Amino acid sequence: MRTLKKILTNRLSGSDRIAVLAIGSTLRADDIAGMLAAEDLKKILKKQKKRSSVKIFFGETAPENLTGEIKKFKPSHIILIDTLDGGKKAGSVYLFKPEEVAEGASFSTHKIPAKILIDYLTVSCGCGSTIIGIQPKNIDFGKKISKSVEVSAKKVAATVAKAIR
């Protein structure tokens, strides 16, 4: 996570308004990772009484419904957090710029691919963007989150909070 913090800190340098868009289904096991990370981030930032210039958007399975609100916020950087099946060990964390996302990467269970959504928001808002993906173990309906994915989601939240400072 040290590398994640360093890269995020560099990418967020000079960003005065940061939007965090969490994506995932609360009903599909590890697909909740992005939502869990955002909930934890919200708690951390509240305790720190930091950065009213950070706004967290909970997109769940229809993040495209929040594009208007995000554009209205006028972010200088957007961080998207979602599950991403890159074929690695459950709980692995991926960090990308949207242009680095491979065509074969499989994000979450939402309708619009995360890459298309973040590309649209980046162009519409004229801002930078970063995608953080967490490797799921299982996204079956009605199952609980895997321990390794839960731990990674919490670490992502803590790391993002440190990078935002």
Image (tube, helix red, strand yellow):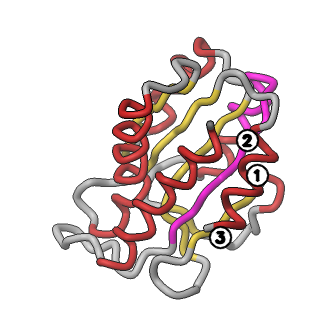
Which is nearer the eye, 14 or 92? 14
Q: Which residue is mark 2?
A: 129
Quadrant containing the N terminus is bottom right
Residue 72, given in percent of the width and then of the height, sits at 59, 12
Could you tell me if the residues under marks 3 and 2 are in contact, i.e. CB atoms within 8 Å? no
In the rendered image, residue 8, in percent from the top left (x then y), is placed at 72, 50
Label 1, on which residue?
98
- Disc assigned to residue 105: 3
**Residue type pointed to by label 3:** Ala
The reply to whether the C-beta atoms of the residues labelled 1 and 3 are less than 8 Å apart is no
Q: CA distance from mark 3 to mark 2?
A: 17 Å
The quadrant in which residue 150 appears is bottom left
> Which tag, 3 or 2, sits closer to the chain's start?
3
Mark in front: 2 vs 1: 2
How far across and down, in percent of the image, does residue 136 sit?
43, 75
Decide which of tag 2 and tag 1 comes sooner along the chain. Answer: 1
Q: CA distance from mark 1 to mark 3?
A: 11 Å
Q: Position of residue 145 (x, y in %)?
A: 27, 70
Type of amino acid at the residue the image marks with label 2:
Ser
Q: Which residues fall within the magenta stretch?
A: 119-134
